[in-house]
Amino acid sequence: MDAPLATPCNIQICEVTCDSFRIMWDITPEDSARSTHFFIDLSRKESRDPNRFKHRDVPTKLVAKAVPLPMAVRGHWFLSPRTEYCVAVQTAVRQPDGDYLVSEWSQVVEFCTGDYAMEHLQQLLDKAKGSAGRLLKFSVFYRNQHPEYFDFVRGECGGLMRPALKDISGSHGSPVNGKLHGVFFSCSTEFDTGLPPKDSPYGPQRFLIPAGHLLNPNISLYFADFYCMYTAYHYVVLVLAPVGSEGDTFCRSRLPMLDLASNPFLTYTAPQRPGEEPLFCHASDVILEVIFTDPVSLDQGHVEQIRGHHQLMSLTTANAKKDPSCKVCNISVGR
C-alpha cells in the first residue's frame, strides 16, 4: 500500500497581479517525485464555504498537473482585481485505476489581488478611444455641489477646495479608486449651446473656473478609467496633475500619460499667434470625469446657481458599479 502524502504546509503566495498569482508550499522530495496533480481550492473570501469539497465528491475548482513550484495560477474568468481570496491545496497521485491518493487539505491562506497594471489600462484606453467621438470646444471646468459645501470651503478651508479620496466607482481594478486624492470636475457641454448642462445630480450650485487654470503646459494628463453603469453612455476618468506634484508622482508609474495636444478626450492647443487664446476641447460621445490632484481656490473662478434641476440622482456616479457584461468597456482581466 502506498505511503500517505504529507499535508502541504507553509503555503506562500507571491507575484500577485490583478488576475494571477504564484503559489508554493513545503513538500518533501519523496512527495514531489510521485505527485502527479495539485488540487487548488480557490474562493472569494466573502463567500468561502466552510464545508470545502473533497475530490471524490465533486471535481475541484482547479486541477493542475504537478509542476515545479512556485506554480502560476491565472485566469480572468475566476480572478478579479482588488478582491480577497482564500486558497488551500492538496497534492495527489493518480492511481492506475483512475482514482487518486490525496493528501489532507492544507491550511487556508488569504490574499488580495492587485490593481490593473499599465498594460491592462492601455487595453482599456484603446477601447475608450473608439467611443470618444469628435472633439468639442469648451472654456470652463465646473464642479456642482450643495451650498453647504461652498460655505464650508469658505469658512473652514480658507477658500480652498481640498482634494478628497476618489471613491470606488468604475472599474474595480483602476489604480486611482480609493487611493488617489483630488478635486473632481466636469467639462461636458450641451450640443446646442456649448455651455455646461443646465441640470446637476450633485447640487444646485456650480463653481466654474477658466479651463486654462487646470489645463495648461504645466499639467500632466493621465487616463484612469473607462466604464458604464448599465447605460448606453460611457464615462472616461482623467487625472490632471501639476508637473512634479505628489499626484503626478502617484500617476506616473500607474497610469498611461496622454499628450495634452493630441488625444481623443481632452486637449489643450497653444495659441498660434500673439493675442490668441489657447483652444480647449473635450470628447463629445463620452462623459468626462476629471480629477485635479491639487487644491483649487474659489478665487480662481466663481459660484453660480444652476438653471435646471439638481436632484437627478439617477445620474450620479458615486460608488457606482461597472456593468461587467458590457462588451464596449470591459477587458479580459476582470472587471
Image: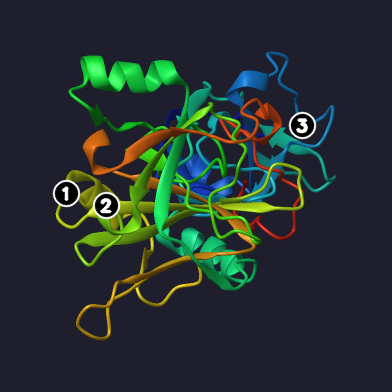
Q: Give the image's coloring scheme.
A: rainbow
Callout 1 touching callout 2 (CB < 8 Å)? yes
Q: In this view, does 57 lie to the left or right of 265?
A: right
x and y percentages locating residue 96 in the rendered image: 80, 48
333 versus 99 height, above or below: below
- In three-dimensional space, the C-alpha distance between marks 1 and 2, rounded to whole angstroms, equals 7 Å
Report the amino acid beneath label 2: Ala
What residue did someone put label 3 on?
A: 55
Nearer to us of marks 2 and 3 is 2
Q: Do the residues labelled 3 and 1 touch (CB within 8 Å)?
A: no
For residue 210, above or below residue 161? below
SS of the residue under disc 2:
strand
The disc at residue 241 is 2
Q: How far apart are marks 2 and 3 (CA)?
A: 53 Å
Distance Cα–Cα, label 3 vs label 1: 54 Å
The kind of residue tagged 3 is: His
Of the two numbered discs 3 and 1 on the same chain, state the one appearing first in sequence.
3
Q: In which quarter of the image is residue 229?
A: top right
Residue 26 coordinates in the image, percent (x, y): 41, 35
